[in-house]
Amino acid sequence: GSAKLDAFRELLAEAIDDGHRVLVFSQFTSLLALLRVELDAQGVASCYLDGSMPARARQAEVDRFQASSAVPVFLLSLKAGGTGLNLTGADTVVHFDPWWNPAVEAQATDRAHRIGQTRVVTSCKLIVAGTVEEKVLALQDTKRALLADVFEASDEAAARISLADLKSLLT
């Protein structure tokens, strides 16, 4: 059994019952494949996109999701689904696992926050306590704090930012 999968099942069932459409992001295509099997077993229609797909197939999946409310779930590789997509058909975003760079997750969430979105968008992360996922969240917080210091820096805060801090933002 998997506590995370159980939480996902519950979240997904509630979202679908309430008429929401869901983007599910993961950095692991192998996990997305497992979720795809899970959705098929439940009889839940879904779209799928990862970086190995040719541009035409990617666009076909995006168009299918956008055009049909009969497809409530879109499974996306975090990196492949993080840029250049308009997915306003969704109003719920699930990050199945965390990525070390919070900007990448924010960019993925923004796929649903586009011009033409008429609904409130809800975003959530599924994190298991006591795992490396908590450490990834801590790393995200550190990166956010560094960015805040860079962009909102007073002279005093700017003086505290080291070259190593700036390099860590870029890597």
Image (tube, rainbow, N blue to C red):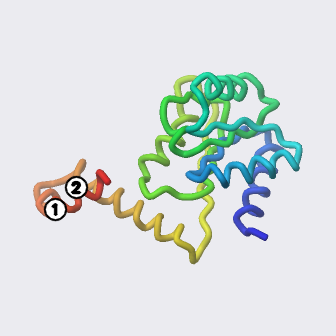
Tell me the quarter of the image containing the C terminus.
bottom left
Residue at x 51%, y 39% (from the top left corner) = 82
Residue at x 56%, y 38% (from the top left corner) = 51
Q: Picture coordinates of residue 16 (x, y %)?
A: 80, 43
Tell me the quarter of the image containing the N terminus.
bottom right
The quarter of the picture where residue 5 lies is: bottom right
The quarter of the picture where residue 22 lies is: top right
Q: Amino acid at mark 1?
A: Ser
| In this view, 1 is above or below 5 | below
State the SS at label 1. Answer: loop
Going by the picture, which residue comes out furthest to the bottom? 130
Residue at x 23%, y 56% (from the top left corner) = 167
Q: Amino acid at mark 2?
A: Leu
Label 1 belongs to which residue?
A: 162
Q: Picture coordinates of residue 105 (x, y %)?
A: 49, 48
Q: CA distance from mark 1 to mark 2?
A: 7 Å
Q: Are marks 1 and 2 in contact (CB under 8 Å)?
A: yes
Label 2 belongs to which residue?
A: 166
Q: Is 126 on the left or on the right of 168, as rendered? A: right
Q: Is 67 on the left or on the right of 104, as rendered? A: right
Q: Picture coordinates of residue 153 (x, y %)?
A: 19, 53
| In this view, 66 is above or below 144 | above
